Image (tube, rainbow, N blue to C red):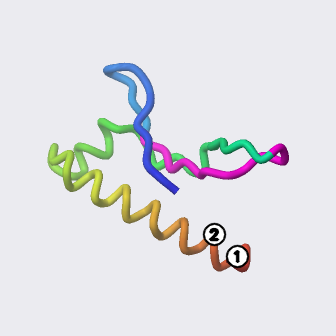
């Protein structure tokens, strides 16, 4: 799973995306979980975008681990 920031300049959201294979074998991705509004989360990290991204990537890693445990991978 990976992190993506989407939206316009003043209205961004941070999502965890999941990559997967379709039945026809082509790769695709889908939103797995919304972490929140970019500006709101950035405030929680005192404006430090690096800390925000480290946290977000950590959340993606946790979700990946949980998904793998539940799916038996």
Q: Position of residue 37 (x, y in %)?
A: 40, 38
Is residue 16 located in the magenta-colored stretch of the structure? yes
Region in magenta: 14-24
Q: Position of residue 12 (x, y in %)?
A: 39, 30
Residue at 67% x, 44% y is 27
Measure how far apart labels 1 and 2 are at the Cα level. 5 Å
**In screen coordinates, is 55 left or right of 26?**
left
- Extreme residue in the right direction: 23
**In screen coordinates, is 43 left or right of 2?**
left
Mark 1, secondary structure of its residue: helix
Residue at 72% x, 79% y is 72
| Main secondary structure found in the magenta portion | strand
Is residue 6 located in the magenta-colored stretch of the structure? no
Residue at 43% x, 25% y is 7
Q: Residues within 10 Å of mark 2 (few under 14, many from 20)?
A: few
Q: Quickly name the residue at label 2.
A: 67
| Residue in the foreground of this view, choosing between 30 and 12 | 30
**In screen coordinates, is 48 left or right of 32?**
left
Query: Residue 26 has which mark?
Result: none
Q: Quickly name the residue at label 1.
A: 70
């Amino acid at each position: 799973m990976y992190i993506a920031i989407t939206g316009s300049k003043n209205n961004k959201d941070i999502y965890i995306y999941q990559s997967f294979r379709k039945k026809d074998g082509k790769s695709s991705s889908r939103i797995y979980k919304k972490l929140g509004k970019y500006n709101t989360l950035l405030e929680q990290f005192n404006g430090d975008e690096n800390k925000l991204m480290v946290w977000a990537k950590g959340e993606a890693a946790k979700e990946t681990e949980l998904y793998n445990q539940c799916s038996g991978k």
